[in-house]
Amino acid sequence: MKIVFWGTPRYAAENLTKIVNAGHEVIAVITQPDRKRGRGKSLSPSPVKQTAIDIGIPVFTTQSIRKDQITKEILISLKADIYIVVAFGQILPREILDQPQLGCWNSHASLLPAWRGAAPIQWSLMNDDPKTGICIMSMEEGLDTGPVIEKETTVINDSDNLEILTNRLSNLSSKLLIKSLERIKKTKKLSKSLRLHKLNAIDQNKLTGIPSYARQLKKEDYLIDWNNSARRIIKKIQGLYPNAYTLYKGKRIKILEASILGNNIQLIDDPLIFNDSIEERIPGEIIIINKQNGIQVKTEDNLIQIKYGQLEGKKPTEGYTLSLQSKMKIKDIFSS
C-alpha cells in the first residue's frame, strides 16, 4: 500500500516516523514551504520535511495546494493508494481528495465534533476541557466533518501544558493511524461507501458533543488579560505554552509556569508589603516579591504565583530571579 503523507509540524513528523518504522511504505511527503524560524530568521524546513529528508523520502512543498498545478500533476504521477494527513495546515480540494483509491484520511487531535479546525489542542486546554483525544476520519471538503473510524480519549490533567498534551496525543495518533492503515488495507477492492460501512465509520452527527471550532490563533491571543479569573489565566498559560506573555514597562515577559493561590494570605507578616485588602487590589498588580514566594499577582478573583518565566532577551528562570532581571516592584502593574 503506497502512502503519501501530508503534514508540517513536529507533531506530524513524529507520526511519519512511527508509520515508517511500522513497515508502511511512504512514497512521498507533502508539506508547507520553508519558513523563517529562530532568532536569525533564516529559512528552515518544516519538521516533517526534515524528517522525510533524514529517512530518504521524496519531499514536495506547496504554498497552496488549490493553486499548485505542478504538485497536483506530481501527485497524479505517484499513483498512491492512500493519503494520510496530520496537521498539514491547508484544506485539500475535492480533486485531491478523489485521487487515491483508498481515500484521504486525517488524524485530528480532538474528540470530534468538538474543536474542528487549526488549533484543537490549544483550545481544549484554554477551554479547560476535562478530556480530549484523537479521531481518525475519512476526509471531506468540509472542515474536519468526515465520518470517524477510530477514536481514543485521554484525560486532560491539571498539570498538562501544550507540550505535555501534544506529546501524549502524538503517541495516540501514531497508534491509531497504524491500526487504521491495517484496517483500510483490507478494503482495497471496495467502493468508498462499502469501505466506510466495512470500517464501521460513524457520521459525526451521531457522535456525542456539539460542533465547535478551534480557530487559528492570533498574536493578541497570547497576551494575558489579568482581568480574567486565575483559573482562566492558568489555562491560557498552559494552552499556549511557552508563549503566553504579559508586558512590564514595555518589555515582554513570557509566563511559563504559574499556580493559583487563595486570597487568604497574611500580607501583614511581610513588612515589605503594605497592609491593604487583596480584594481591593487591581488585576495585574504585583502583590508579593520575595525569595520564598517569587512573584504573586492579582487577577479578577485570586492571586497567581509565577513560578517560571522569561524576560525578552534572557533565558527562562524561576520567579524571584525573573523579578530581579525585570527590576519589578510591589504595587507595579502588568499590562494587559
Image (cartoon, rainbow, N blue to C red):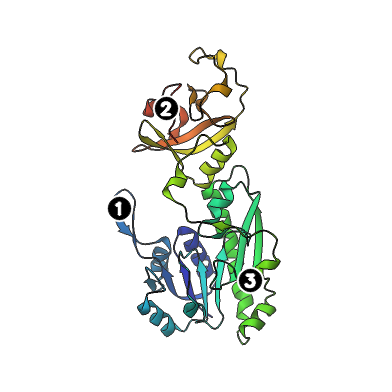
**Mark 1 and mark 3: Cα distance apart in space:** 40 Å
Which residue occupies 36% across, 36% down? Answer: 314
**Mark 3 and mark 2: Cα distance apart in space:** 51 Å
Task: Kindly identify which numbered label has been placed on residue 144.
Answer: none
Task: Kindly identify which numbered label has been placed on residue 147.
Answer: 3
For marks 3 and 2, the one nearer the N-term is 3
Image x and y of residue 248, in percent:
39, 32
Which quarter of the rendering shows the C terminus?
top left
Residue located beneath label 1 in the image: 41
Q: Quadrant of residue 160?
A: top right
Measured along the vertical axis of the image, is residue 324 above or below residue 103?
above
Q: Are marks 3 and 2 in contact (CB under 8 Å)?
A: no
Foreground pick, 190 / 220: 220
Q: Which amino acid is tagged 2?
A: Ser
Image x and y of residue 242, in percent:
46, 44
Q: Which amino acid is tagged 3?
A: Pro
